[in-house]
Image (cartoon, helix red, strand yellow):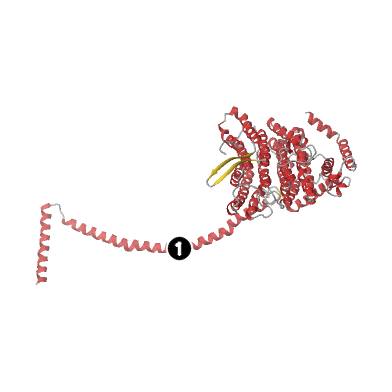
Amino acid sequence: MNEFWLHPALVLILGGLLLPLVPARLRKPYLLLIPALAFARAMLMPRGVFGEVHFLEWVLVFGRVDALSSVFGYIMGLMCLISTLYALHVEENGQHIAAWLYAGGALGAIYAGDYLTLFLFWEVMALSSVFLVWFRRGPESLAAGFRYLLVHTAGGLSLLAGIVLHCKAGGHGWSFDALDVHHPTLAAYLILGGFLLNAAVPPLHAWLPDAYGEGTFNGSVFLCAFTTKTAVYALCRGFPGMEILVPLGVIMALYGVVYAVLENDCRRLLAYHIISQVGYMVAGVGLGTQMAINGACAHAFAHILYKGLLFMGCGAVLHMTGESKFTELGGLYKKMPLTFVFTLIGGLSISAFPLFSGFVSKSMIVQAGFDQHLLWAGFLLNLASVGTFLHTGLKVPYFIWFGKNQCKTATWERAAEPPWNMNAAMAVAAVLCVGIGCYTPYLYQMLPYPVDYHPYSSYHVSETLQLLLFTAVGFFLLIKKLEPEPTISLDMDWFYRKGARAFYWLARRPLQFVDTCVGEGYRLAGLIPLMFSARGAGQFDNRIIDGFVDGFAGAVAAFGRRLRRVQRGQMQESLSLSFAVVALLLVGFLIIFTRVAR
Amino acid sequence: MKLVAFIEFLRRQLRRVVFICLGLLAVLVVVDAIPALVDKEHAHTRLEHLPGFWAVFGLLGCIALILLSKAFGHAGIMTREDYYDE
């Protein structure tokens, strides 16, 4: 394709790079204009293959626009706009640039038609997103950012190794299409490993609560939308129907729920629920039917909005009070009632309450599981729904806005409704969450396959209402058990956090000991004899060589001194003496010569 | 603010609110038992045909999740906040 084709990621990336040059009075309109343009571009792009670039021996495809990439591109463009509105009052340009590069990376990966382009944007995402953690600037954020970067570097390497093996050694070409999921090769497993790490599938998940809990109040809103959902897209594209993903997805769904019970930090709790919700999508990809893939896409779409809304609500609490731990909050409904309502809408959406977005998306995956006769998967995913409502629908709103007021005086005095732009962003997301739940064609018409599913059957509504409302009964019965505790929960990051300490210990103790031994051995066996021989050579030089040279010089000097006495300054006298000496020497020489000759 | 006033009104009427909610829960289970209102044709297992099956599933599931998760947490997973700071 030779004609000009504008990539929506390019709008964000160039827009971000030009941001520092924008005059202050135009800055806010510009901040809204760029993501709005990117979203409009993603929304209006025609289907087809665009942006083919010949580079060395490869053909890079930057724009594969089809049904699958369009739905992900649409929601990511929309979320970038909402998240930027949420952060509109943030003065620091770097934060907006990092966020736009990150969203641009996600869009680039979504529209990539070949593995190299995918990998390129995959790494852009990892590198730019870490700044959304580092910009919080605390020592814990710095450390969490480094851990995040190292883990994603490992995932990127796995992906790259798999790509090279698959495309070069396997001779499959560089096109990013579905792999053979029934006979996976080592290359396929390596690529899958890279995708699963970004999707936060246990045991490769600990980076997510670690980093998202430490991100800036606005950075985590971006973070929760892009990385895991890009991975879900990549799984939908590359591994539909891979059976191992069904049990992995179910484990994810329950794992996140269990850890959410234990969590004291509201944003880390939400992060664990990302793992849980992405579990539904991963299971949907594993089921692989048209309905399941539709469900995975629909749930990713809905999830980006309601999880963004939840992170915006808890981010507003963090921004306005400086606190995110349940043990430092409580009773805030008097100070932040609007934020409470928005967060509650997010909670009801993620819990799949009828009339909210999760109800029309999550149920497609559960239904697909039941349709495949995987009853265990269907029931366990419903159990995870119980846990989701328990925490995100009940625990988060209750212990922040109601419950025992545990705010310190300073926290309580700081608490207030957030700035207008944050409220506006939350309102837009909330309206969309309700809109998607009430008017299903909006979402269903975007899905990759035709939808033959009606969520509002009497049985489904009755099932869901019973499931969720009786969960609420259980919550209030055991509310004492759920009282937040000022603790952290050990997770898989324990292995590399403590492992790193073990490595330090190894370096400090045994390796240092070996190093000392080698150094001492070198000193004893090499350095000391060397010094001894050098000292001997020095003494030889000093006494013998220098003695000879000094002695010869002394003798010459003494002879010169004696010779000087002969010279008294009279030219004629000196000349006569010289001639006399020469004459005497000649006479003596002749006498000796004639005697010897005779 | 009207929203705060409404929440405080509900909190003042807490006993009544709880009573109404329990009544609604009972209605929900009763409705579930009436085939004319809730068509269980799409149920996947026989168990689901029992009236209030999902209510029991939700309640027991919630209790089990809380108790088991907390037991798991107190078995050494939950630890002090400065655990990694040393």
Residue shown at 20%/58% (left/top)?
Answer: A562
Name the residue at the bottom extreme. A598
Residue under label 1: A528
Q: Position of residue A178 (x, y in %)?
A: 66, 48
Q: Residue at x 69, y 54 (%)?
A: A182
Disc 1 element: helix
**What amino acid is at disc 1?**
Ile
As drawn, the residue found furthest toward the top would be A25
Q: Residue A425 versus residue A288: which sits nearer the camera?
A: A288
Q: Nearer the viewer, residue A379 or A66?
A: A66
Q: Is residue A560 left or right of residue A356?
A: left
Which residue is pictured at 53% across the width and 44% down the height?
A: A55
Q: Position of residue A312 (x, y in %)?
A: 70, 37
Give the mark count: 1
Q: Left or right? Give the position of A477 relative to A291.
A: right
The part of the image, by quadrant, that contains residue A347 is top right
Q: Position of residue A553 (x, y in %)?
A: 26, 59
What's the chain of the residue with tag 1? A
Question: At which x and y percent is residue A272?
Answer: 72, 45
| Crowdedness near tag 1: few (<14), some (14–19) or many (≥20) residues, C-alpha within 10 Å | few
